[in-house]
């Protein structure tokens, strides 16, 4: 009588999203876990744990068990997934007994990294676990016709990785994955403020700077912002004023590496599909796609139209959930 629950999980470096077939996105939490280092107990998961980053006593640490889109700490990831699944089952209003799960992995991940993802999800009591590649999930979530024999180019700029893929006939024709994403841009901003002003700022402040005054390498009206950090000379709190052109300069090196990945993927494209790319353009998705000026800069550099996904932050999760309908065609790894 009762069909098994079907859910899709976007196991991202920055956020974990859970998609249910009936209710859409039911959970969107930061991929952060607060741990007691003495007992290894999990104290908080998600938004509650993220609010603790950089503000905890010595025996409590807020950690991110996913790095560069893959599992860096298996035990902590399993604990985090169990807590996330428990929250998700409350949202759906039923106990998620033996759900069928599709989880996404970066296209550049190794078989060992994929096995770790499968084992972590299976340890939460899933009936079956399927893995789908992130760019394919992003394309499905953005309503691209992935099953048709036409070229769909997806650039998914996430927290830990940037995935570039040409998808046709339900599979990946050519792809590139670089371990550069939102986290690397945040690090570049921290280093810039440290070198230029002798002030140390935290990850959350760097992320805020990127979102408010971060720009792709294009001409723009200068924006400014005041940030607070710790002066490295005298150790006292200090406020500095930052401008968008210096932030643009600080992150441009990483953005050029993303551009290089897009170019090399397009170079590997079969000539038959190149015509489709000129007509249909490139779709950008993921949190990095929301960086100011990103769309204009990329379209200028690669000379084809660049479109922003309707919902860049959620398209991978939506596609992961929707892919359950035709998982057999897309199957890359199964239990």
Image (cartoon, rainbow, N blue to C red):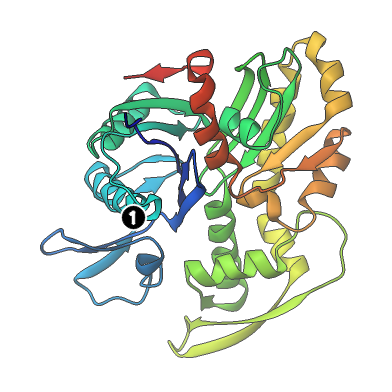
Residue identified by numbered label 1: 90
Left or right position of 170 against 17: right
Q: Quadrant of residue 247?
A: bottom right
| The N terminus - image quarter | top left
Q: Is residue 204 above or below residue 283?
A: below
| The C terminus - image quarter | top left
- What residue sits 59% from the left and 55% below the top? 185
Q: Which x, y percent locates residue 152?
A: 73, 25
Looking at the image, how many numbered discs can be counted on the residues? 1
Q: Residue furthest left?
A: 39
Report if residue 108 is visible in the image.
Answer: no
Q: Quadrant of residue 282?
A: top right
Neighbours of disc 1 within 10 Å: few (<14), some (14-19), many (20+): few
Q: Is residue 322 above or below residue 212?
A: above
Left or right position of 216 against 200: right
Q: Nearer the viewer, residue 311 or 231?
A: 311
Q: Is residue 76 above or below residue 105?
A: below
Q: Which x, y percent locates residue 155?
A: 67, 36
- What residue sits 38% from the left and 60% below the top? 46
């Amino acid at each position: 009588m009762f069909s098994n629950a079907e859910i899709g999980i976007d196991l991202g470096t920055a956020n974990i999203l859970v998609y249910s077939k009936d209710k859409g996105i039911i959970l969107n939490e930061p991929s952060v876990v607060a741990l007691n280092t003495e007992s290894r107990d999990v104290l908080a998961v998600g938004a509650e744990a993220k609010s603790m980053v950089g503000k905890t006593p010595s025996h409590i640490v807020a950690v991110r068990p996913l790095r560069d889109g893959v599992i860096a700490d298996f035990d902590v990831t399993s604990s985090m997934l169990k807590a996330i699944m428990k929250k998700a089952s409350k949202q759906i209003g039923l106990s998620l007994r033996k759900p069928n799960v599709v989880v996404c992995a970066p296209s550049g991940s190794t078989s060992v990294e994929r096995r770790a993802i499968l084992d972590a999800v299976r340890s939460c009591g899933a009936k079956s676990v399927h893995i789908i590649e992130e760019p394919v999930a992003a394309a499905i979530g953005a309503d691209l016709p992935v099953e048709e024999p036409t070229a769909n180019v997806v650039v998914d700029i996430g927290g830990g990785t940037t995935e570039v893929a040409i998808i046709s006939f339900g599979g990946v024709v050519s792809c590139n994955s670089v371990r550069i994403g939102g986290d690397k841009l945040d690090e570049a901003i921290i280093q810039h403020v440290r070198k230029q002003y002798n002030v140390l700022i935290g990850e959350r402040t760097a992320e805020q700077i990127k979102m408010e005054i971060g720009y792709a390498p294009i001409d723009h009206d200068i924006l400014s912002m005041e940030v607070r950090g710790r002066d490295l000379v005298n150790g006292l709190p200090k406020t500095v004023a930052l401008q968008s052109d210096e932030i643009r300069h600080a992150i441009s090196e990483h953005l050029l590496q993303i551009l290089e990945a897009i170019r090399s993927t397009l170079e590997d494209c079969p000539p038959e599909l190149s015509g489709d790319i000129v007509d249909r353009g490139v779709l950008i998705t993921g949190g990095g796609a929301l960086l100011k000026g990103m769309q204009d800069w990329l379209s200028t550099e690669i000379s084809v139209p660049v479109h922003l996904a309707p919902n860049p932050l959620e398209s991978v999760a939506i596609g992961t959930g929707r892919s359950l309908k035709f998982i057999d065609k897309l199957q890359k790894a199964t239990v």
